[in-house]
Image (tube, rainbow, N blue to C red):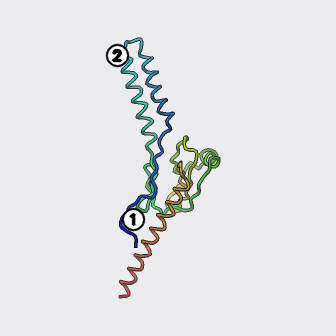
């Protein structure tokens, strides 16, 4: 029997942070804002530097705060929480396939957690007939690890369901 700690362990948690170069661009936006305000004096220039860089940093940070998690029988991707029972076959996409599924192969009904700076992705079929979403597309730096976590969590859920079924049949029989 598994220990209680194993049932609460998160097999997968990834934050799709923005690349370092984006932070440099955020700082440069502050510099450009400062240079724009230079004719008004030193104080407005410094305020422009601080406000421009801070506003840009907030935008970069919020864009890079998207998370993908596999936890408690669900896939959590950004704001979406999808039960594993609604997920079908999952496919790891290499760089070329990722580009294709972002562009000409993309279905407008799909749920996409897309980050252009992440070169690989996972595409997971949705099997729930009540859901019009054909698949979930998730940008991820570690597609194989995400697939392994999904498999691990599904196996764990199957074990729990089997134990419940055995307990229920034992209670009915006894």
Residue found 62% across the figure and 47% down from its top? 95
Locate residue 92: give its quadrant. Answer: bottom right
Residue found 59% across the figure and 45% down from its top? 102
Describe the element under mark 1 as helix, strand or loop: helix
Please determine whether, in this image, residue 30 is positioned above or below residue 105.
above
Residue found 58% across the figure and 48% down from its top? 120
Which numbered disc, 1 or 2, marks the residue that appears first in the sequence? 1
Query: Given contact means CB atoms under 8 Å apart, are the residues at marks 1 and 2 in contact?
Result: no
Residue found 43% across the figure and 55% down from its top? 81
Q: Residue furthest bottom?
A: 174
Badge 1 crowding class, 10 Å Cα cut-off, few under 14, some 14 to 19, many 20 or more, is: some
Side of 9 relative to 119 (left or right): left
Residue 140 rendering spot, x and y as whole percentages: 53, 49
Assign the N terminus to one quadrant of the image: bottom left
Residue corresponding to mark 2: 43
Residue 134 appears in view: no
Describe the element under mark 2 as helix, strand or loop: helix
Rendered image: mark on residue 24: none
Badge 2 crowding class, 10 Å Cα cut-off, few under 14, some 14 to 19, many 20 or more, is: few
Residue 161 rendering spot, x and y as whole percentages: 43, 72
CA–CA distance in space, label 1 to label 2: 56 Å
Residue 114 appears in view: yes
Residue 24 rendering spot, x and y as whole percentages: 48, 30
Residue 78 rendering spot, x and y as whole percentages: 44, 49
Please determine whether, in this image, residue 152 is positioned above or below residue 97.
below
Locate residue 31: give its quadrant. Answer: top left
Please determine whether, in this image, residue 34 is positioned above or below residue 66.
above
Residue corresponding to mark 1: 7
Assign the C terminus to one quadrant of the image: bottom left
Q: How many numbered circles does the render carry?
A: 2
């Amino acid at each position: 029997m598994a220990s209680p700690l194993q049932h609460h362990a998160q097999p997968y948690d990834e934050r799709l942070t923005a690349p370092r170069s984006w932070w440099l661009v955020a700082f440069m936006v502050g510099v450009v804002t400062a240079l724009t305000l230079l004719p008004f004096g030193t104080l407005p220039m410094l305020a422009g530097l601080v406000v421009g860089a801070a506003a840009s940093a907030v935008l970069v940070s919020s864009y890079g705060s998207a998370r993908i998690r596999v936890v408690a029988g669900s896939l959590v991707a950004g704001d979406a929480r999808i039960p594993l029972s609604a997920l079908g076959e999952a496919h790891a996409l290499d760089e070329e396939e990722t580009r294709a599924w972002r562009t000409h192969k993309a279905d407008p009904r799909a749920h996409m957690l897309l980050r252009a700076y992440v070169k690989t992705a996972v595409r997971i079929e949705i099997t729930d007939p009540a859901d019009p979403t054909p698949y979930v597309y998730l940008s991820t730096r570690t597609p194989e690890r995400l697939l392994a976590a999904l498999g691990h969590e599904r196996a764990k859920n199957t074990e729990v369901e089997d134990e419940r079924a055995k307990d229920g049949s034992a209670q009915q029989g006894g």
